[in-house]
Image (cartoon, rainbow, N blue to C red):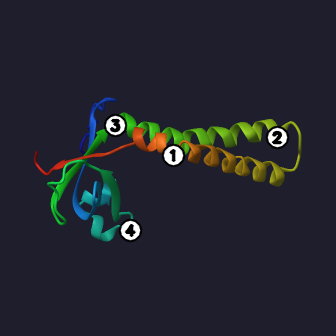
Amino acid sequence: MPELQCRDYKMNQPIEHAGVIHQINGKHIRVQILQESACSGCHAKGACSAADKKDKFVDIESDDSDYKIGEQVTLYGQSSMGLFAVLLAFVIPFLLILLTLFVLKNYTDNEAISGSIALGILLPYFIILSFFNPRLKSKLKFHIKKYGA
């Protein structure tokens, strides 16, 4: 059995995705990337239903007008950006639900009401988060460079 090897990931290590320019509209560039699941590189992917590939589109702002539709490019960003996104999208909502359930446990015995309120607490959270959308877009931003550059 092969031994598992783990890479040493650091917070400032860049995240890179290869992509193809799909659309250009002034400074806005839409890049198509192929997102693969971790098992898509496995030799048994043909027999497994877990292998998953999806085309994703990422919108990028760039002052460089050298790009052409169909050109291969590399998108890059910091891994800390990804961790921050996971914190906002998954960790904080999970903690809000958990905290709400623990608090409501003391006030009501009806689990259906407690669960509904706990899930409902996510609505104001995401509404408040949407007010910070411009600020988050500037913080959670991919950059573009020519493929191989």
* SS class, disc 1: helix
Q: Nearer the viewer, residue 52 or 1?
A: 52
The residue depicted at 32 percent of the width and 58 percent of the height is 35
User: Which residue does the numbered mark 1 point to in the structure image?
Assistant: 133
- The circle on residue 79 is 3
Which residue lies at the image location 81% right of the left edge and 54% below the top edge?
Answer: 112
Residue 149 location, quadrant: top left
Q: Which mark is residue 40?
A: none
Q: The disc labelled 4 sits on which kind of residue?
A: Ser
- Residue 49 is marked as 4
Badge 4 marks a residue whose secondary structure is loop
Q: Is residue 19 left or right of residue 91?
A: left
Within 10 Å of the Cα at label 2, are there few (<14), some (14-19), or many (20+) other Cα atoms?
A: some
Label 2 is placed on what type of residue?
Leu
Label whose residue precedes the other's in the sequence (4 or 3): 4
Q: Which mark lies nearer to you, 2 or 1?
A: 1
At 34% across and 37% down in the image, what residue appears? Answer: 79
Residue picked out by circle 2? 104
Picture residue at 89% right of the left edge, 46% below the top: 109
Q: Position of residue 77 (x, y in %)?
A: 30, 41
Q: Earlier in the sequence, mark 4 or mark 1?
A: 4
- For label 4, the crowd category at 10 Å Cα-Cα, with few meaning under 14, some 14 to 19 and many 20 or more, is few
Label 4 and label 3: CA atoms lie apart by: 29 Å
The mark nearer the N terminus, 2 or 1, is 2
Considering the numbered disc 3 on the image, is that residue within a helix, a strand or a loop? Answer: helix
Q: Quadrant of residue 22?
A: bottom left
Q: Is residue 27 left or right of residue 123?
A: left
